[in-house]
Image (cartoon, grey):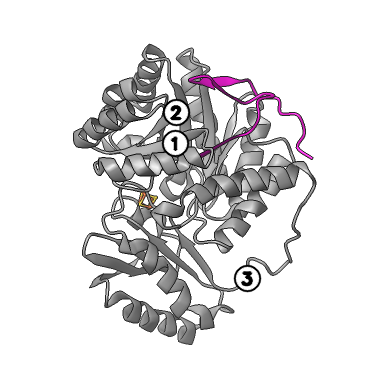
Amino acid sequence: MIPLRKTRTIQVRGLPIGGTAPIAVQSMAATRTQDIPATLRQVRILEAAGADLIRIAVDSDKDVEALALIRAETRARLSVDLQENYRLAEKVAPHVDKLRYNPGHLHHHEKARSTREKVRFLVDVARRHSLALRIGVNAGSIAPEYKERFPGDDVGAIAQCAIDHCALVDDAGFTEYLVSIKDSDPRLVVDANVRFAEARPDVPIHLGVTEAGMPPEGIIKTRIAFEQLLSRGIGDTLRVSLTLPFDDKGREIAVGRELISDIENGRFRSVPPNFFQGLNIIACPSCSRVENEKFIELAAEVRRITADAKDHDLTIAVMGCRVNGPGETDDADLGLWCGPNYVNLKRGELDLGAYKYDEILARLRTELDRLIASK
Ligand code: SF4
């Protein structure tokens, strides 16, 4: 049930991705990168689960030092997630097999430098170190110029951003790259990837529904997108993003392989027309930016204390960090993002302040009740 894919094949240290290669399954370390024993343990858990590639987030020079030590202890294929500090690419390159950059984060640093120059820099680093590159577009962090060009049209914005960045990488004469276009809404993931694949059938695609949340809902949302895309021959590697305790992260790999096998064998699940109605809780899968592991528990508690509101068409977003939390909660009715000691809360765009971990649930509930009453 998965048609022959027609993209070119790229290599990530001996792992072919795209074309007729098997669909590669990957995941990401959820631990703090500088906690070397914990991150190595995470890498080993994912390796044991059969991960083809493991991503690690790097934000600082100290993270790079930790990454070098982790690299010395494992032969796993490593990919690095460059967030705002794209120039760290040069320092991390000797320790990894693939770089991921987010076009929506390139504007944060060196504002006088053009996007073209920044992409050229990343391509040069990747080429010098024989690395693959991922252009990782995310609807939660759309580059400002695309927000302006596509007001109210997130699908158009993220698909066009990916297409334009492919052109920038092409212009630099580099072909060892792939693209991901993610969001927490599987419908948007399907539409944007279909649009991108029509424009660039040659470019391998990494699939994912970001912040899908906890199982089983997170798995269901991911399945909806993957069934629609893989059955159209779209998708060459994938990640299932689930909010799980660190020691259970191998489940992301197992679920990824199960979804591929089901789709290959025609085992599709139908989705009722009202599936997207009612309370929607999105939660990030956590990564090295999580400053308090209570985040995982908090996400589960949010689901528990809001269970009786399941019939209300509202979205609650629970994010693990202060870096991406504010942006990733923009479209939610109620958004929470976690710091070391406090959890920030907002209603729509209104900031409601920061609350201790033992206070936040009561405050959230009050806001939820107010929202329900006002509807
Ligand atoms: S929201 Fe923060 S902690 Fe969660 S996955 Fe994204 S960057 Fe990591």
Which of the 4 image quarters holds residue 91? top left
Q: What is the crowding at mark 2: few (fewer than 14 residues within 10 Å), some, or many (at least 20)?
A: many
At numbered mark 2, what does the secondary structure look like: helix, strand or loop? loop
Q: Which one is earlier in the sequence, the residue at label 3 or at label 2?
A: 2
Q: Residue at x 75, y 41 (%)?
A: 264
Q: Which residue is mark 3?
A: 277
Which of the 4 image quarters holds residue 9? top right
Residue type pointed to by label 1: Ile
Cα distance, mark 3 to mark 2?
40 Å
Cα distance, mark 2 to mark 1?
6 Å
Residue 27 visible at all = no
Q: Which one is earlier in the sequence, the residue at label 3 or at label 1?
A: 1
Q: Nearer the viewer, residue 75 or 103?
A: 75
Q: Which residue is mark 2?
A: 77
Q: Which residue is mark 1?
A: 54
Which of the 4 image quarters holds residue 125? top left
Answer whether labels 2 and 1 touch (C-beta < 8 Å): yes
Q: Nearer the viewer, residue 184 or 155?
A: 184
Residue type pointed to by label 3: Gln
Majority secondary structure of magenta residues = loop
- Magenta residues span 1-26
At numbered mark 1, what does the secondary structure look like: helix, strand or loop? strand
Q: As displayed, is residue 299 above or below residue 265?
A: below
